[in-house]
Image: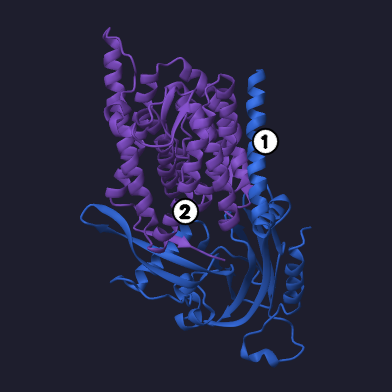
Chain colours: A purple, B blue
Amino acid sequence: MQIYLPIAEMSVNLFLLLAMGGGVGFLSGLFGVGGGFLLTPLMIFIGIPPAVAVATVANQFLASSVSGVLAHWRRGNVDVKMGLVLMAGGLVGSGLGTWVFKILRSLGQIDLAISLSYVLFLGTVGGLMLTESLSAMRRSRKPVPVSRPSPGPDHHESWIHRLPLKMRFRKSRLYISALLPLAVGMAVGILAAIMGVGGGFVMVPAMIYLLGMPTQVVVGTSLFQIIFVTANTTFLQSTFNQTVDVVLALLLLPGAVIGAQYGARFGSRLKAEQLRVLLALLVLGVCLKMAFDLVTRPDDLYLLAGGMR
Amino acid sequence: MADWLRPARLLLALLLGLVTLPLAADAASGPREQPLVADLSKHLVAITTGFSGSDVLLFGATDGPGDIILVVRGPVTQQIIRRKGKVGGLMWVNQDYVTVENAPSFYHVASTRPLEDLVGPATLDRHQIGMTHLDLEIGDLTLGETEAEFKSALFRLKEEQGLYSYAPGAITQLANRLFRSELHFPSNVPTGTYLVEVYLVRDNDVVNAEITPLIVGKAGFGADLYLFAHEHAAWYGVGAILLAVAAGWTAGALFRRS
């Protein structure tokens, strides 16, 4: 059954959209990442104009993050204070990122910048996560008592603990400088704006390894933070580019929400290390695909762009 | 019907008034029978929510034997064609590009016989019949590529999108008088005012032509939404946020009960 998308100006199969939403939703429920690094390329692959895909993904994530946060909220897995600090950084970062995006586009190399940042960040994050979680799995098999699963901040406690503006984050059981989550939020915001993703795949590991947050709180808090960043993106994209297709976003939603619920249920049966290994493999897979596309000769050297009416 | 269609309808009525444009030199022959008449089964292709492409029938009659050429042109757009090149012996990156200022957004040619059997290249150039005879304004080339390479890439990519096509023999004739041809518009058809041109060819020359307008426009809910998104962009953004929050909340609440 075909349905016409008024902003994307094309028809797509309704069931294809439902299935895409469901698949990405399942993964996002499982790992607590938005899945933008999967959904955006998928949408472009089925022919949706990249500008519309990037903007609509933000709107769709807003909806699925709201429903995701509700589930985590009921289980008490949202650190609101941490989320708000991350959000403040995120809003500044996405503003900066939009500005950088504009400069890169005027240089005519935004495609390359997007591909390279996908390869670079997915590769780094995926690689780090894979090695860490594999060694964590090995450790957990031996009967050695592990006091804390994420040794991240302990290494550089010295200077990190000297930073000003210390804040107590009760839910995360942390007493750290607010500058740290602010910086994380800002860096992720910049990346998110350039790569057209929610930034969960960078945010989640950053929260675990850089901030040292407990894994159970990470997913809910990152979703909470993503609500505000995606709302901001939706508004900016609608206002300046008219590229948010609400029909497309709403059609992706049912699959995404249902998929996310099953993903979350399935995820609660797995161990945290196992989840991280799976996410790492997924992230590395997308990274390798991007790198492969960058270095192999494309089928068609030419492509059409523009087409302003 | 949506407000925006009103000016389009005016234009349509106006154009229908001057539908017959005899091009041949013998146009002054007075009350003689028209050598060529043609019309479309509909003059408006409405893109509604369930739109998945549309077919329009072109039909007409001639006053005697002759070949028919049909050209459908969509509104003119600016088009950038990029070409990838290898950088640093490793990555394929967009390198050269050209800008075409006046590429038709849709272009379809059909005829009773292959074009080269009907008229000479000069005539095809004059009427811009056939992709290679389009008079495209091409901007400066950035590197050593030839214009022809970029042009053929444009035609190939547009054909892949189903927006450019050439169908020799796709016009059927009956008793040397009546003719008909099916026009297909795919679901990604650009909106705007199209021109459907019908040429009558005799003895290797165009002896008569007729132009009929065709409007391709969004209608119903989709049209209203598109208009709202463009004219009240900030409110559309606020609406999109509220809608997403409400939908997400509803979905989350529904799942809690089950």
Residue of label 2: A98
Q: CA distance from mark 1 to mark 2?
A: 27 Å
On screen, residue B189 above or below B202: above
Q: Quadrant of the C terminus of chain B?
A: top right
Give the amino acid at mark 1.
Ala
Q: Residue at x 62, y 73 (%)?
A: B197
Q: Residue at x 42, y 16 (%)?
A: A270
B186 on left or right of B4 = left
Please give the chain letter of the residue carrying mark 2: A
* Residue A60 seen in render: yes
Q: Tell me the mark number nearer the camera, choosing from 1 and 2.
A: 2
Give the amino acid at mark 2.
Thr
Q: Nearer the viewer, residue A247 or B161?
A: A247
The number of numbered discs placed on residues in the rendered structure image is: 2
* Residue A23 seen in render: no
On screen, residue B14 above or below B240: below
Q: Residue furthest right?
A: B1
On residue B246, the disc is 1
